[in-house]
Amino acid sequence: MLLVIAYSRAARQALRNRCNAHPETVVRRFGRAVCLAETELGAFLALRLRERYGGDVQVERTRALNEFREVPERVRDAAVAYETRQHPNTPYTAFAAGTDHPDTDEMAEREL
């Protein structure tokens, strides 16, 4: 996918207009950011915006996250355990203390 982020008001309006004119290319809209299909038309629309608005438009190529291939099992298990915890107001650091779940500092230092 192509992630297009519009920073100025004029660029955001132009991005909205392009999305409305070509809905088949839009994968997802996030207000000032849009994911476009990774097609020649998606690239054309993104590059037109960047040509017109320069630094007010950022274009990035993205790829989907395959959580089972790219995220360690211990992190997936910790996420499931934390979201199904008995007390919903318990912060993660308190929840993970004394368990095999990784702490936030440890996770922050490791890249996927």
Image (cartoon, rainbow, N blue to C red):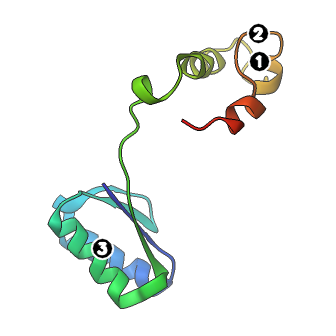
**Label drawn at residue 46:** 3
Q: Percent from the top left, x then y, of residue 50?
A: 36, 81
Specify the amino acid type for callout 3.
Answer: Ala
Sequence-wise first label, 3 or 2: 3
User: Residue placed at 38% from the left, 31% from the top?
Assistant: 66
State the separation of the CA atoms marked 3 and 2: 47 Å
Position of the C terminus, as image quadrant, is: top right
Disc 2 packing (10 Å; few <14; some 14–19; many ≥20): few
CB-based contact (under 8 Å), mark 1 and mark 2: yes
Q: Position of residue 92 (x, y in %)?
A: 75, 26
Dot 3: element: helix
- Residue at the spot of label 2: 99
Kind of residue at disc 1 = Ala
Q: What's the distance in space between the residues labelled 1 and 2, CA to CA?
A: 5 Å
Q: Residue 55 location in percent, x, y?
A: 48, 83
Say which element carries label 1: helix
Please tell me whether residue 38 is drawn above or below residue 88 in the rendered image: below
- Check if mark 1's residue and mark 3's residue have beta carbons within 8 Å: no
Dot 1, how many residues are within 10 Å of its Cα: few (below 14), some (14-19), or many (20+)?
some
Q: Is residue 102 above or below residue 32?
A: above
Instruction: Provide the residue designation for mark 1.
Output: 96
Q: Amino acid type of disc 2?
A: Thr
Image quadrant in which you'd find residue 11: bottom left
